[in-house]
Image (cartoon, helix red, strand yellow):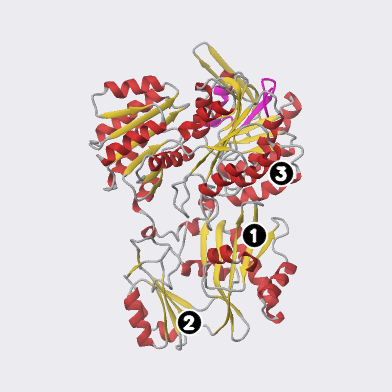
Amino acid sequence: MSILIDKNTKVIVQGITGKTGWFHAKQSLDYGTQVVAGVTPGKGGTFMEETVGDKKYKVPVFNTVKETVEKFGATATVIFVPPPAAADAILEAAFAGIKLIVTITEGIPVNDMISVKAELQKRSAECLVIGPNCPGVVTIGECRMGIQPGSIGKRGKIGILSRSGTLTYEAVDQVTRVGLGATTCVGIGGDPIHGANFIDILKRFKDDDETKGIVMIGEIGGSEEEEAAEWIQKNLKKPVVSFIAGATAPKGKRMGHAGAIISGGKGTAQAKMAALKKAGVRVVDNPSHIGQAMLELVK
Amino acid sequence: MKIHEYQAKNLLKDFGVPISKGFAIQNLNELDGVYKNLGGGVVAVKAQIHAGGRGKGGGVKIAKSEADMKKFAGEILGMNLITHQTGAQGQKVRSLYIEAGTAIAKEMYLAVLLDRETSRLTLIAAAEGGMDIEELAAKSPEKILKFQIDPTLGFRAFQGRLLGYGLGIPDSTHTELIKLCQSLVRAYMELDASLVEINPLVLNSENRLIALDAKMTFDDNALYRHKNILELRDVNEEDALELEAAETGLNYISLDGTVGCMVNGAGLAMATMDVIKLAGAEPSNFLDVGGGANTEQVTKAFQIILKDKKVRAILVNIFGGIMKCDIIANGILEAAKITKLSLPLVVRLQGTNAKEGLAILAKSGLKIDTAETMAEAAEKVVKAAKG
């Protein structure tokens, strides 16, 4: 088993006709993902086609998400739509009945996400948004939604969740090197307002039999790591290894991610690490030790 | 993006927020007639810099005559103002705001900002103003009043009345307070702000409310739809290297250490700073070259890191995904040649084609040390920086 997505998931790509959208649609097809259709308003009825060597790619494009749900039974979407139209793309998918909405787009205005989030909270039982500003979701060897490199990581027993992209790859790589391998890797994204939080994903890893241990990578800003720590202490028996990026980050400076900022004395790496340690999580100071620490806990 | 107090007040005035009359000046010769135009009496001379704590740092003076106003203006304009927010190097004062004085009966705090825990806008207030709200939040959190703002309902009158009673202002001023709060929320939403702060909000001797100070910051991601806000940008107040980096699509923040670093991804860049510290040195910067780093960007990144004369060694930490490590290795070599790099360079490559990438660097003949893990790379670069 795995969480969120598997080889049977029918995926669409919103913004498939853009350069990045099409590049990653092809990467996902190579990975074995069922990319059934793309959506770009105004380009409906056309196809995205390309031949690379002996590989032929052909994906139908539709004007609306609704059509892809009706025609293919699509249940998941990955969004590459540019920031000004991205919030609308998320809502379109939610209203069309898509269950998993993975939003890669970086740079969506916060105010746009406030309205989107308010609507999503009403629909929390029927759909889950991952991101925005995230690397996406990969169930190793089965399905790839987003921009994570398909070449790293072998299937195994560790679930990975993270607010950062390249640190997610770092973790997948390390658990693979120590021989544990990974089940599903989820990047929840670096924006201050996002869909799924750590707890939403931890719950799913808890219920997944194949996942025997969890790597959780946080960073400065907000209080989700602290909330996750509390939840872990009460609900989770599986071992968790955690790294929090930004212990050396100065106060009041935004460190790349829109959400990575220590403001009002809140959101420090030190406070997050302390909360996680208190909850029984194995916190590593050095990100190079993630794999080894996990190995020691999951023998 | 940050703007000056006088700019924030100009914007807020259009939304109906009560402010005192004032004039912004860049030169002392612009002072002629200002005192008379403000109606004489007491005026405030306020340094305009993008940092708080101006009063404590000596950047705000109260003048009771035209002569005093001119004297204070002469002292403050051009001074290097050091506050708890500017850092030790301070910030040069390039403009002043001269404002009519207010007879203060009560000072309060009022702000609209995003509450990340609820994903809602929140209005926060305190009956004690003019002080550091972070300090108050830490010492007596019960003194801070909070009102969640529903995105469809907006800030409601009943919330304003609760706020009025909480602040202890006369009932007769409640209507004015409700209108003021609604104006702030409207300004926040319509202008895509990330903070609107009135500290202090003043009740004057006639029981009227006045925004004595105003601070606004804006969501960088929304500036594309606010050309008028972009025009308010004061690049003199921003770090020159950070600006230059931003123009090439690099995310750079200057810090105080000696180890320069170049990394792909914000999280990994922060983690790299952390391992440098663990290995016994301080990073000189945060630098995220992004997911699709090419030779041009790597070259620019080196150039920016090298402009910081504190740098003693450089660490490149790349996790290759879609962008393969062998291609990145060639980019690093090219960039090292173009910038005539002479400082010690440690490169850690991991991920797609890492072995090939490291081999290219090893064969280059350039003095580049390589590493497989972040920990190993950090130890090597710190040793080089200290050596």
- Could you tell me if the residues under marks 3 and 2 are in contact, i.e. CB atoms within 8 Å? no
Looking at the image, can residue B258 be seen?
yes
Number of residues whose C-alpha sits closer than 10 Å to that of mark 3, classed few (under 14), some (14–19) or many (20 or more): many
Measured Cα–Cα span from mark 1 to mark 2? 31 Å
- The picture places residue B19, in percent across and down from the top left corner, at 54, 75
| Picture disc at residue B100 | 2
Q: Is residue A20 magenta?
A: yes
- The picture places residue A38, in percent across and down from the top left corner, at 63, 28
Amino acid at dot 1: Thr
Nearest-to-viewer mark from 3 and 1: 1
Q: Do circles 3 and 1 both sit on a common chain?
A: no
Residue under the image location 38 percent in, 70 percent down: B95
Amino acid at dot 3: Leu
Helix, strand or loop under label 1: strand
Number of residues whose C-alpha sits closer than 10 Å to that of mark 1, classed few (under 14), some (14–19) or many (20 or more): many
Q: Quadrant of the C terminus of chain B?
A: top left
- Earlier-in-chain disc, 1 versus 2: 2
Residue B345 horizontal side relative to residue B131, left or right:
left
| Picture disc at residue A120 | 3
Number of residues whose C-alpha sits closer than 10 Å to that of mark 2, classed few (under 14), some (14–19) or many (20 or more): many
Measured Cα–Cα span from mark 3 to mark 2? 48 Å
> Is residue B274 depicted above or below A63 in this figure?
below
Residue under the image location 67 percent in, 46 percent down: A116
Seen from the viewer's position, the closer of residues B235 and A130 is A130
| Picture disc at residue B122 | 1
Helix, strand or loop under label 3: helix
Amino acid at dot 2: Ala
Q: Which residues are magenta?
A: A1-28
